[in-house]
Image (tube, coloured by chain):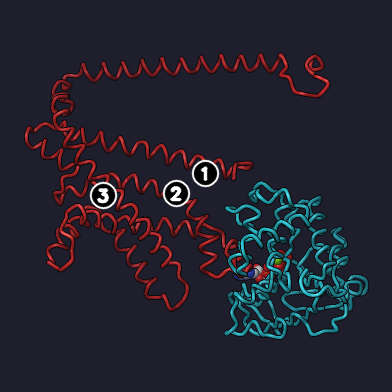
Chain colours: A red, B cyan
Amino acid sequence: MTSLHKRPSGEWVKSERQLDRERRRRRQGVRSGSVAAASTILFVVLVALAVTSSPGWPRVRETFFDWERFSAAFPDVLGGFWLNIQIFLVAEVVILVLGLLVALARGLRSPLFFPLRMLATAYTDVFRGIPTILLVYLVGFGLPALELQGVPSSPAVLGGLALVLSYGAYVAEVFRSGIESIHPSQRAAARSLGLSQAQALRFVILPQAVRRVVPPLLNDFASLQKDTALVAVLGPLEALRQAQIHQAETFNYTPYLAAAVLFIALTVPMARFTDHLAARAERRRAPGGAP
Amino acid sequence: MTGPATEPTAEPATAPLLRVEGVWKNYHGHHVLRGVDLEVAPHEVVCLIGASGSGKSTLLRCLNLLETVDDGAVWLDGREITDPAADPDEVRKRIGMVFQSYNLFPHMTVLDNITLAPVRVHRRSRREAVARARALLERFGLADKADAYPDRLSGGQQQRVAIVRAMACEPSVLLLDEVTSALDPELVTEVMGVIRELKQAGMTMVMATHEMGFARDIADTVCFLENGVLLERGPAEQIFTEPREPRTRAFLQRVLESGRL
Ligand SMILES: Nc1ncnc2c1ncn2[C@@H]1O[C@H](COP(=O)(O)OP(=O)(O)OP(=O)(O)O)[C@@H](O)[C@H]1O
Ligand SMILES: [Mg+2]
């Protein structure tokens, strides 16, 4: 049978058996696709029927899914959401730098740096212990109350600062665990080549550690992105605050839904991206994976 | 290779390149090295043999200051390197080390692994370092692996890359810690070939090994360690044929029975 397909050059021509196998596999693929589609449609229809036919549904729709109020509030909420994104982007960069510096400070061995190490440890312990909302109040209302020179007065900046303090402590711990997860033999190999402590860290330990902590960092950033809404308590016109204003005018909760939709629109792609990175890292760890 | 290409001599006629005197090391009160003395002449190949846990790795790690000794001293080229004022980084620039588990940097290509220290530590230009690295890879049959990542190489290839990486720094002494014990038997020979070639080029080496046949073949001097004591030291032939110490004889007998000689 194979001899029929073998050319003198030894070039591979798929056998009838293989072609048939592939045809059958394709057919199976189409079949499972249609089964999945049919069961999903059926499920959605049933749930929709159950919800809309329930006695409370008209009230729920009126309070949360009022299309008119949604379109009325959406432009303002979207405008406010831009401020959330700005706070998020700026805070994220500062948090990364702060977190890395604190993690490095905690790893310093020289007795000269003992105070710095103590400070870094105290910082992570304290700021990981305080609820973020409490920090927002402390920084947002407490700092201006001091009436010191040079303290920013913008609520968005103060709120951002509170987020930086809180998340910086978390991110520092993520970096530190990444650094500690690198096997000591890597450091020994680097030092035995004559690299100094700092060079070993910079060229050998950190590049490996950073690669390892990207997925957990992205997780932290997904939640940072949501927590920008906590700044609302200080009064800047971000998404939640705008939704609140619209809600207060009409006692209808649909504007909150508009804000929620915007936050979801940003976190879902981020979550999928994190999954994608984690899956890729997993494939790489597997034997024969790409480097 | 490094230094003048003089004939390798078994007799340490010149001043020792490496001198170890009364070195003690303990971990949590457990004495792993108990006053070890050792001299290594230029171009000499010294093999450390002894049972598992006898302190071979610890001695090697003390030699390039990955461990600090608890007593005694080590001299390299007449300068005490265990002096607290000595700069460990300077010492390690001159002493290469290869580990049992290769310890290549997984995030770098083979070429970057090899050129890292020459560029960052020895301040070579990148071009020069790359040229030298490629020449070394060529010499050890790894030319086509320059751009591969370590996890794509076989164990034998990884270990040869690790040796090339250490050699790229042109060390005065190379320390090898059981560089073949993590390898499948058919890969052991290719790594041994590399070490043999280094010996022919006049490299000074101190090597811990369980491969008695190889030690007998390549070593000028063999040292038998037991419980942190350097019990016996002599020319390879003498140690393997007529060891003076009864305990050396007993050790070699055990190895012989387990079929490793
Ligand atoms: N970092 C350490 N902390 C505590 N004990 C250690 C440490 N390193 C080595 N030891 C102990 O020192 C002793 C000697 O270890 P060493 O690795 O030098 O032996 P070895 O001769 O190289 O053995 P092997 O042939 O198995 O490699 C062992 O008992 C080991 O448990
Ligand atoms: Mg050992």
Give x and y (percent) for residue A229: 22, 45
Q: Is residue B237 left or right of residue A124?
A: right
Question: What is the chain letter for disc 3?
Answer: A
Mark 3 lies within 8 Å of ligand 1 (Cβ measured)? no
Q: Which residue is mark 3?
A: A87
- Tag 2 and tag 1, C-beta contact below 8 Å: yes
Instruction: Identify the residue shown where x is 77% and y is 78%.
Output: B230
Mark in front: 1 vs 3:
3
- Tag 3 and tag 2, C-beta contact below 8 Å: no
Q: CA distance from mark 1 to mark 3?
A: 30 Å
The correct choice, above or below, for A257 with respect to B261 in the image is: above
Q: Is residue B226 left or right of residue A247?
A: right
Decide: few, some or many residues near mark 1? Use Cα within 10 Å; few <14, some 14-19, many ≥20.
Answer: some
Instruction: Identify the residue shown where x is 18% and y is 37%.
Output: A77
Give x and y (percent) for residue A192: 63, 68
Q: What mark, if any, has residue A214 been given in the picture?
A: 2
Task: Kindly tell me whether residue B53 is visible in this rendering.
Answer: no
Mark 2 lies within 8 Å of ligand 1 (Cβ measured)? no
Callout 1 secondary element: helix
Within the image, what quadrant is residue B165 found in? bottom right
